[in-house]
Image: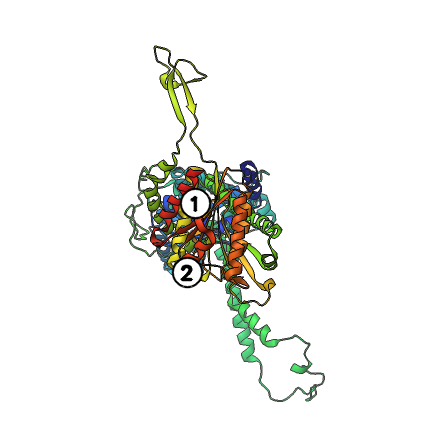
Amino acid sequence: MRMKNSDYQKRIRSETEKVCPKEVFASASYLRMMKSVAWELTGGRPVNVRLYYFPGEDRLGWSDGKTVGVNYGNGLTQSFLTMEQQNLSVTGILAHECGHEVLSDHGLRMHYTRGMLEGIWYPRPPKPQNEEEKKSLEQIRHYFEKKDQMALSLIVQVARYLHNLLEDVYVEEIMCRRFPGSAKKGILLNRERNVEWLPTLRELLQEKEDAVSILMNLFAQYVLSGRVNNWTQEEHPLLDTVKEALPAIQKGIYGTNPSSRVLAVNQVLLKIWKYLYEIIQKMETEQEKEEEDSQNQEAEDKEEPHSTQQPANKETSLGEGNASDEEKPAGCDTTQDSETSEEKQEVSPMEAYLRHLAARMPKFVQDPTTGKQFRDLPKDVSWDGDWDANWEVPEEKEEAKIPVMVIDTESSLQELLYQMAKERVNVQVDAEIQQELQKELDEADFDTGHRKVKKSVCRLSEISEQQETQYQEFSRKAKKIQHRLQTTVLPFLNISGTRRERRLFMGKKIDMRSIAQPQGAIYCKDYPGKKLDAAMAVLLDLSESMSGKRLEQAKLAALCLYEFCRKVGIPVLIYGHHTDGYFHQNLEEETVFLHSCAEFASDRKDGYRITALKPNGANRDGVAVRFIGRKLAQRTEHCKLFVLISDGLPNSNQYKGEAAKKDLIQIKKELAGQGISFLAAAIGSDKERIRDIYQNAFLDISNIEALPVTLAKKVAQELRRK
């Protein structure tokens, strides 16, 4: 049943290719990995990480001061074809959001935009660099002093977008310098894909977009890639505007002062004001026209006479006049139409344009979600919004030197994939082993009574946390017992390892430790250690009467024997058995359960299976002993030892008393004829009756606490005799 390691590894590699990205990203192991990465990215801050799959959400990720969220179902991440690329994308998003946690002051940004809506241009208006900008600044001042909400709402939306854009790239540039490796690769990979999705200048012009929408896309292209996507060599005045704004944008991206991004946004707003001003004037004209139309409509309504009589040329009955509600076409809802028209009237021209502008802005630049409150104003420049103060450009501070840390999620992903595939293969192998064992049990030869009952092999494949904890407790106790046995049992067996004789004058193998011997004794020879040519099987009674201390000590003894056999190189088989526990008139209705804990080919879950055994039903020893004896008899080792741990005689349907006793005596003789030594450890009240069956193979364990040690020593004696 043991698979070759090469075949095992081949199956794991094949299974690795079947694991889908969504399954990996949704796993607890991947979340733990990303939490570890976030801890490094934030310098050890206690930030929670939330990974979720939401394809309908535009945002890639977010941070609110306590939690960093990454939507691995976003369109950008899902656009990559390989899991490795998607992992880098997720890592880049996480690095981006963690960078905001460490570097960004979202509270200050909110203070900046709220000040604009209140007519305050923080920290102060930008310095004009030519006559056109002086004129633009006066026009802007007019709107700020009026607190014109229509104009200020447009300025705020553009300012918010530009600030988010500069802040995003500023954060990413620092994170790329501090964290090369997967974090940097992921950030740049996401940037490249975002740039690919941005429309070219030619496409924007063909769609007849307004100048402000085009500028926002051109700024995004330049900030992300250092160039404008204009491979068709279009000539347009907007390109000159972008070039004029580049120095301010560069300062915003690489400025280290707290106010750098805000100052850069203010400067860019001044340079693109003429396009904003055109929009504002257009919206003002449309609003004035709407107000004029509204006033004219009100005047007409007042002049229209109100008469209770019908016109003379129309009949008073509902004939050729206005149709009643019953006569209107089906589906015509006047109430709904009026509500819809009212909704349309409620949306002002500027509101409609702002919605359009928001739809045309690149989706990856989004307003941050933050729980951070505004604390204090920066000290690098005066935040008083004074229009008449002398302008002084603050000197940029040098970025604090922080040790570079390489983030590597690519190797971790491969290890995670391997482990996930390995777990899948282990489950498949366990299922295959169980099927093979069941087939072996079905083909085993039993006498008439045992042949009638149903027989089922049980093999635990998935280990729960509770079972892991239980195993750890048993393992600690077993180690103490192993320590006691180490000084008695192993020397008693005279087991030795490989021995090497050194400083020989003749030989085939050179001893490198003696290569400099002047006499020429530079050879050595290895002598193989003594090994036991033995195999052992352990069978545990799992009937209800074994509940409590008996089964606990029986499992501990089995675990000690298992570890002992592995240590000295003895193949060991460990099973537990019980019936379904019900009274059945017909033997065909009874089921005997055989629990495979450890096969001769060891498995990493063997110890968990042993300690997870539970009592149930009764015991039909004849089925279990004959099946385990059959498996042991097929071994080629010289010494074969069968250990049965039980607290009483069989007590199942039509299998008890003298009939069961005779059956077991016969099975013992058959096992002896096959060269199998039998040892029955009795720990219950039926010790004397068990002695009658097994005679010299009987081992009385009066002290249950001493069961593991006593049984191990007895096993060692039996092995030494052989």
Is residue 198 visible from the viewing direction of this image?
no
Q: Nearer the viewer, residue 222 or 247?
A: 222
**How many other residues sit within 10 Å of disc 1, few (<14), some (14-19) or many (≥20)?**
many
Counting from the top left corner in percent of width and height, residue 467 is at: 42, 54
Give the mark, 2 or 1, whose residue is nearer the N terminus. Answer: 2
Quadrant, the N terminus: top right
Q: Residue 562, which numbered label? A: 1
Q: Quadrant of residue 653?
A: bottom right
Q: Is residue 259 left or right of residue 363?
A: left
Q: Amino acid at mark 1?
A: Tyr
Residue at image location 69% in from the left, 81% down from the top? 327
**How many other residues sit within 10 Å of disc 2, few (<14), some (14-19) or many (≥20)?**
few
Q: Amino acid at mark 2?
A: Ser
Q: Is residue 218 above or below residue 338?
A: above
Residue at image location 59% in from the left, 73% down from the top? 337
State how far apart marks 2 and 1 are (Cα).
22 Å
Q: Nearer the viewer, residue 510 or 71?
A: 510
Q: Is residue 692 left or right of residue 635?
A: left
Q: Residue furthest left?
A: 379
Q: Is residue 23 left or right of residue 160?
A: right
Residue where numbered disc 2 is placed: 547
